[in-house]
Amino acid sequence: MASDLSVVLLLVLFAWLGLKVHDTVAELAAFGRGIQEAGTTVGTTATDAAGAVRGGFESAAGAVEATPVLGGRLAEALRSAGEGAATPVERRGREQARRLVEAGRDGELRALATARLLGWLTFLTPAILLLSRAIPPRMRQARALDAAQRALGGERLDRDRERALAARAAFSLPYETLRRHSALALALLTLGAVHALGGTGVLASFVAGVTFSLALGERYAKELERMQSALEHLLVVTADAGAADALLAALPSGSLVINATGLGKDRPGSPLSDAARFPEHGFAWELNYRGELDFVRQARAQTAERRLHVEDGWLYFLHGWSAVIAEVFGVELTPERFARLCATAEPIR
């Protein structure tokens, strides 16, 4: 799912940014380690200096120690003076070194702790905001799917219940979703009228028209918007095949004729009579994909004479259902994926 993949990629990006912030701040710990090394150096220098002082006095004591009568006392005095001078230097140096090492170690630990804190904050703050927007819709979708599965109870649907379920799916789509696919879908829904055709409701045709508009997509949105204002005036309801033949005869060359009545599948026959004349260079589209398909038979009989392009509803059927399923489950129905679906379904056509 594209949306889920985007969420995962954003989380990976946030984690990477958190690591970069952590590593950058952690480099400040080098200052603390430098102070520790400086403290160690100070301690070593103080010890060396005290040793040098002691060594100097010891050399002087050795030089006068052989002097008769007073040599021993002078040597002892020199050694005592050297120790008195070296000990404070060594003690203060070691104390200063200890303080520097402790300060450096504390600075290093604080820098590492700050790096961890800022790294986690860099990752968690946008991640929580992102998940707070991404997870609730998924939870609602999961609850809706679970409720639908419990309602259906796993039973096999007959033709009428399939049609009712398809109608419910089409009519329950938000206007924003319909508008994203096509302006005509919104126009058809806003008409909001279901008429009677020879005692048979044309709800299936209405739903088919909505699904057809979804299949057209944004590429034809501007053209469909220009058609929207004309829909109310072009809507003609008739139960007479002769009147339908007359409407067909009045169409200009290259017109598209769609049978969305259900006749030829749900009920036998065709909305046209065999005497109907399709427009030259026209397109005849039967939305049904099974049944007697009398409309297809009538159009194919005039293919050569009227130079018609005739299509049945097989691809429309595949695309309509797969588009609804893709919308429900958040799957991107790419041309490549749809081509594989058509190839898989072809043997059972």
Image (cartoon, grey):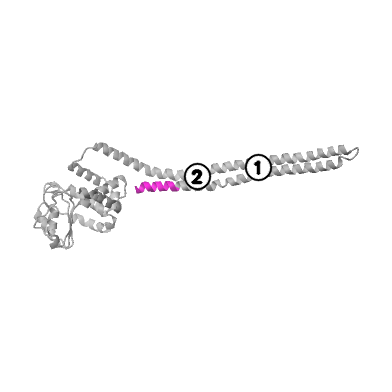
Which stretch did the figure color magenta? Answer: 1-13
Horizontal side, residue 175 vs residue 158: left or right: right
Q: Amino acid at mark 2?
A: Gly
Within-10-Å neighbours for mark 2: few <14, some 14–19, many 20+: many
Q: Residue at x 43, y 47 (%)?
A: 12
Neighbor class of circle 1 (other Cα within 10 Å; few <14, some 14-19, many 20+) is many
Residue 100: image tag:
1
Query: Which of disc 1 and disc 2 is earlier in sequence?
Result: 1
Q: Position of residue 336 (x, y in %)?
A: 30, 53
Tell me which amino acid carries mark 1. Answer: Leu
Residue 155, above or below 182: above
What residue sits 34% from the left and 40% below the top?
139
Quadrant of res 165? top left
Res 232 quadrant in image: bottom left
Closest to the observer, 220 or 291:
291
In the picture of the structure, the residue carrying the numbered disc 2 is 119
